Every structure is written in structure tokens, then in C-alpha cells.
Amino acid sequence: MINYVDGVCGSGKTSEAIKRIAKRVKGGETIIYATSTTDLLKQTMEGLEANGVEVELIISKSDSGYRQDLVSDRLKNRICIEKDNPRVILCVTKSLIKVASRLLSDVKLPLFLDEGFEAIDYGTESQMTGTEIQAVLYNVGLSDEKPKDYKIGNNYKLSEGLKRLSDYTRNPLYEVEFKVNESQLQWTSMLIISGFFQCFSEVTILSACFDDTLEYHAAKAVGIEMKALDWGLETKHYSNGVVHVSWVLSGKEWRTSFKDKLTERQLNDIADEFWREHCGDYLSVNGVGEGSINLPVKSHGINEYSSICNYLNLHTQMPPNFVVDLIKKRFSLTKFQIRKSYYHYHCYQSAMRTVLRKSSKDNPIEKDTYYCFGDKSTAMYFLGKLSNSVKVSCCQLQIGERLDVIRLKPRSDKISLDFKEQDKRRRDRAKLQKWGCKDVLLEKVLIIARDWRRAHTGKNLTLKILKGLVDSVSNCGDLNLGSA
């Protein structure tokens, strides 16, 4: 049986867990506490030490495979030592899963998992020859057939994604499936949940709205009983201000296949329309919108922005079709349930980096807050986390109304590859707009400027060169280039 704590983001699950764990350790128990990042572990360690509890923090100072193996060995040894030293063993969840199958069968300790665990990981490697694919499969242990010219350490070095795959194939707590499609290798790894949890005397999961997650459904699918613990925490969000919620699409889902067809200008126009609603600082997942505060996709534990009232999410977060098909097959989930657990849930999690996170029934915030999502169904999921007493204002963006009814053609001219390139593009855009470039001319010059930067790595795109790029597109006698 798995116990999970019922409570929304910011309701105090970790703080309450620290108190309960401290009490149990003082009563003579040793407990394992695992979460996703070392920063969160260190925060928890401070809370436990403040409660007078002995702790052992077992983490790696490096991401290298050698260091990770040393951490696994140390973690195993520390868990398996004699039980007459009550304490809390703190570790990263991935390290614990890596070592769990090697624990002694007669040593089973209680486990607290903060923010749960990942039931599925996946990856795709493209542009590979048949020999390269065969070498990878042999290297990671998925095939006994070795290429004739295969040499360990020289040929066919593994990418970071394939190193993950190699870790999974070596761990008996994972099932790995793969598919070869011409020059592409697709793989998925699935945690054998029942086998993992049998390594502990009990399991308590601290995860906001855990019954919405893929991991909840995966555990239920293999017959694990789930019990919600009532710790008296908030199960809804409260506010005395108005919560303004908007979205881009009403008739379509916000997906990668749609977003990738939008121009950079259209994405910025969406951000600009949202910004005009509140005219203040706003968090933007993956930094869409000029002047926004960039919020990473995986933002759990990032609490330094909890005074910000505004949030925009135009990121897409659905797995590829081969993963969706596997989930439907293994866990009997519908497409809507998969989308809710992969997309809606994570949008809600990141939206809770804002000031609404600190609001409660006894101490509600007085400020208005503004949220914008890619589609209406995601916005409705977010609204479902609010108390019925909260005043809500909902609408679709005007640009969304136009995008809902037009068919977008595939694009081959995406401007930005990474954040550095996006930043340079923003500066190019500002210069060109100052000179009077706009509409089609502006977009054409931005694409040419992008290609110039990629072809001249390490060189600066000077004003003189930029002017030459404008001249190459159009007669720019009417542009105010001289003042620049």
C-alpha cells in the first residue's frame, strides 16, 4: 500500500512531514527521505536539523557516472548498517531507485518520497546508421549481436540520453522497450513500481494532487492500494483578489505540432496581449515574451518568485506518440487522462511558483493575479484547484480567437535554437524596429540575421553588416538607418 498526502501546492506538505519524521526518529526509527534535487534535500535537511534530528545527506558533487556509482554504493551501505542509530537518510530519488534492488531483504526502512517519482522515461536518437543502432543496442545490453568493428571506448560513444538508457537496462527494477524505425532508435523505460516499493517497510508520497499524476495511475494499474492521508492541509487555493485566467486556443489543444507552426512574432504577440492586461513582471515558462522572467519547465522547489502575480505558459509538454501508445496499453488510460497527467498537472505545478502559492483560507492574498495558458482545457484544470469562493475572470485572448479558425502551414524557418540565440534575436528586433522595419520585411531580415550568425560562429553581427542584410532584402531608403 502507498500512502499519499492530500494537499495542494504550497499547503505545507514538506513542513508537516518534517515534524512527523522528527517525532518518529526521536522514537527510535531510521527513515529514508528522497526527493528530485539536491537543493530540495538541503532545504529539508535544515528543517530536520532545526528539529534536533540526526541526518545523513548522501549526494554526489558531480554528475559523472563514476561519481554516481560511488554514491549508490555509499547509499546502500548506509541504509544497511545496524539500526541502533536512529536518523534520517537523505538522498536523490534516482539514486535510491538505482540502489533499491541491492538492499538487504531483512533491512526495510520507511520511505518518504517528496514530489513522487518518475514511472516512465523515454528518448529518441535520430540520424544513425544501422550499424550504429546495432552498436548502441549491444552497448546498453539490449542485443547480443556485436558489430564487427565495435571497440569499447573508441567507437559508438553514448549520448547523454543513451547513457540514461544504459542505466535503465542495468537496473532490474526497470523494463525497457525499444523500436528501430529506419535511422531512428526510440526507447522507453518503465519503473517496476511494485518491485521498488517492496524494498521498504512503508511508503509515503508528498505530491500535490497526486491522484492526477501518471504515477498514481501506474501504481493502481499494477494493483497497489492507494490511501490518501488527511494531514489537515489545504485542498484548494484561496484569494481575496480576482484570479484572471486567459488562454490562447478554445477549439484546439496547445501542442508541439501547433506551437512549432507559429512564427516568433505570433508568440511574442500572444505574450504582449497577455502583458497588456496587467503591465507588470510576469513568469514565462521557457522565456516566451520579451522582458519576461524565465521559468524553467521543471520548476518544483523554485520559490524565489512567490511575490510575482503574473504567469504565462506557452510551453508544450506531451510525450511522443510511441510513449502515449505504450501508456494506453499498459495503464488503460484515455488520451485525456494522459494529457491531464503530463500537461495540465505540470502547468498547474509551475503556475504555483507565483504569489497564489502563499495564499490560504486563513490568510488569503489581497492581490489580483493573472494566468495565461495555451488552451482552455488547461485553464479549466487550473481553475478546478481554486476554492468556489474565489472571484474568477475568464477569457480567450483575441489573437487566440484568430488562431482557432485558421490552418497553419508547417514552418521551416524557426528563428531560435536556444536562449542565447533568442536573446540576440531580441536585440536584432529592437534595432530593426527602431529603424522602421516592420511586418514581412522585419521577419525576413530576422531570418537572414539568424542564418548569418549560424554561418559565422564567434563573429559579431555589426550594425554595418545588419544594414547590409536589410539592403539585401529591400530598398531601405525610407528607413532611418543613418541615425543608428
Image (cartoon, rainbow, N blue to C red):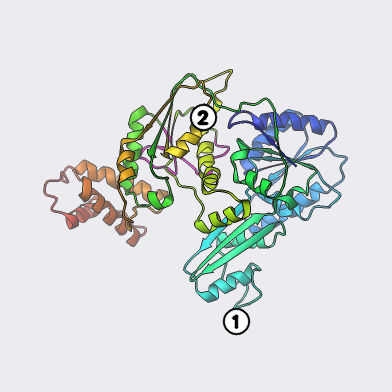
**Can see residue 2?**
yes
Give coordinates of residue 455: x percent, y percent.
Answer: 33, 62
Q: Residues within 10 Å of mark 2 (few under 14, many from 20)?
A: some
- Return the residue nearer the eye: 23 or 121: 121
Which of the two discs, 1 and 2, labels the residue nearer the N terminus?
1
**Disc 2 marks which amino acid?**
Ser
- Distance, label 1 to label 2, CA atoms, is 57 Å
Residue hosting label 1: 148
Secondary structure under badge 1? loop
Range drawn in magenta: 282-302
Residue at the (22%, 46%) spot, across then down: 439
Q: Is residue 166 left or right of residue 241?
A: right
Q: Is residue 204 left or right of residue 104?
A: left
Q: Quadrant of residue 114 in the image?
A: top right
Residue at the (50%, 22%) spot, across then down: 239
Q: Could you tell me if the residues under marks 1 and 2 are in contact, i.e. CB atoms within 8 Å?
A: no
Residue hosting label 2: 306
Residue at the (66%, 68%) spot, across then down: 141
Of the numbered discs in the image, which one, if any, rests on residue 129?
Answer: none
